[in-house]
C-alpha cells in the first residue's frame, strides 16, 4: 500500500547468490517452466497472461533500451490494478513476485516496480542500470508526503535517471518529477542512500523483504 511502501530496513543474515542478474540469461525453457507453474498454481487464464507477458518482452539483443522501457512500463501500468497489501494479501506489507502480481492482476507500488525490474532484466537491460527506489511523493504542496516506490533507469550510472512509475503513465527524467524525493535505492547487488555511490554490496542483508522476494523469484524461474 502507498502508506506502507516505505518499508522498514530489516535485519537478517547475509544471503549468498540470490542476485537477479542471473535472470538476464534465463533460457526460453525456464520461461516455459514459469508458464507451466502459472498453469498448475493458477489455471489457464493466468498461464495465458504469462504467455502474453512473454510475447511482450523485447528480445535481449534488441538495441533500443528506451523502447524496452516503454513496452514494459506500459504493459504493467495497463494490466495491473493498484490495490493495497491489506486488501490484496491481508498483510501490512507484502512484496510480490512477478507471477504473484500477474495472478492477482493487482499490486501496490513495490509490486509494479519489481515486475518491471525483472522484465527489463529478461529483456537484456543491465542490472547496473536499474534501481528500485523509495521516494517521498508530494503531489501537492499543501499535502503531506507519501511513501512510494518507483523503478529508476540509469543510462549512465552518474547521470539523471528515467522514472518508471505506476502513478504516471509517462516515463520522465527525474528533473520532471519534482513531486518525488529519493530516500534510498537498491537492486540485487547494491544499496544506495541518496548519492550515486553504492554504500553496501549486499542489500539483501539490510532489506529483509527484498531478500525474501528474491528467493521466491529465483524459485519460480529455476524450477
Image (tube, rainbow, N blue to C red):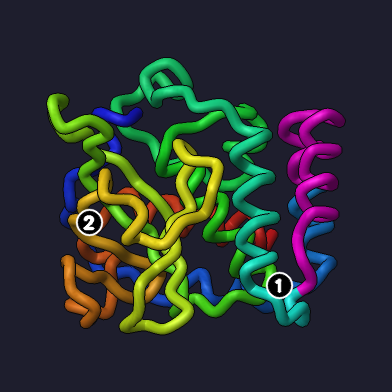
Q: Residue at x 28, y 67 (%)?
A: 203
44 vs 148, nearest the viewer: 148
Q: Read off the magenta span.
A: 36-59
Q: CA distance from mark 2 to mark 1?
A: 31 Å
145 vs 59, nearest the viewer: 145
Q: Is residue 128 left or right of residue 35?
A: left
54 vs 17, nearest the viewer: 54
20 relative to 82, above or below: below
Observer able to see residue 181: yes
Q: Answer whether residue 215 is magenta in the image.
A: no
Query: Mark 1 packing: few (<14 Cα in 10 Å), some, or many (20+)?
Result: some
Residue 116 — which label? none
Q: Is residue 51 left or right of residue 93?
A: right
Classify residue 90 by image quadrant.
top left
Q: Residue at x 59, y 39 (%)?
A: 77
Residue 26 — which label? 1
Classify residue 137 by image quadrant.
top left
Provide residue 124's location: percent of width, then percent of height.
66, 76
Looking at the image, tell me whether mark 2 or mark 1 is earlier in sequence order. Answer: 1
Q: Is residue 31 left or right of residue 7?
A: right
Q: Which residue is mark 2?
A: 182
**Secondary structure state at the residue bearing disc 1:** loop
Q: Residue at x 61, y 65 (%)?
A: 120
Which residue in the rendered view is the most extreme toward the top? 87
Q: Residue at x 59, y 75 (%)?
A: 125
Provide residue 78's location: percent of width, then percent of height.
66, 35
- Count of numbered circles in the view: 2
Provide residue 62's location: percent of width, then percent of height.
77, 78
What kind of secondary structure does the magenta stretch mostly adopt? helix
Provide residue 35's location: percent of width, then percent of height.
80, 48
Amino acid at each position: 500500500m502507498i502508506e506502507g511502501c516505505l518499508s522498514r530496513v530489516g535485519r537478517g543474515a547475509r544471503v549468498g547468490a540470490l542476485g537477479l542478474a542471473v535472470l538476464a540469461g534465463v533460457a526460453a525453457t525456464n520461461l516455459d517452466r514459469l508458464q507451466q507453474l502459472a498453469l498448475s498454481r493458477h489455471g489457464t487464464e493466468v498461464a495465458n497472461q504469462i504467455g502474453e507477458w512473454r510475447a511482450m518482452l523485447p528480445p535481449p539483443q534488441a538495441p533500443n533500451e528506451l523502447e524496452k522501457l516503454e513496452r514494459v512500463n506500459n504493459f504493467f501500468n495497463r494490466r495491473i490494478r493498484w490495490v493495497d497489501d491489506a486488501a490484496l494479501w491481508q498483510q501490512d506489507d507484502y512484496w510480490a513476485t512477478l507471477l504473484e502480481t500477474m495472478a492477482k492482476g493487482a499490486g501496490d507500488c513495490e509490486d509494479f516496480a519489481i515486475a518491471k525490474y525483472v522484465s527489463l532484466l529478461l529483456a537484456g537491460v543491465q542490472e547496473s542500470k536499474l534501481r528500485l527506489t523509495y521516494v517521498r511523493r508530494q503531489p501537492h504542496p499543501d499535502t503531506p508526503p507519501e511513501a512510494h516506490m518507483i523503478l529508476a533507469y540509469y543510462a549512465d550510472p552518474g547521470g539523471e535517471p528515467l522514472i518508471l512509475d505506476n502513478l504516471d503513465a509517462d516515463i520522465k527524467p527525474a528533473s520532471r518529477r519534482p513531486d518525488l524525493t529519493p530516500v534510498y535505492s537498491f537492486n540485487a547487488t547494491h544499496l544506495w542512500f541518496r548519492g550515486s555511490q553504492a554504500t553496501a554490496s549486499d542489500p539483501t542483508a539490510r532489506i529483509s523483504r527484498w531478500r525474501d522476494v528474491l528467493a521466491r523469484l529465483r524459485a519460480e524461474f529455476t524450477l
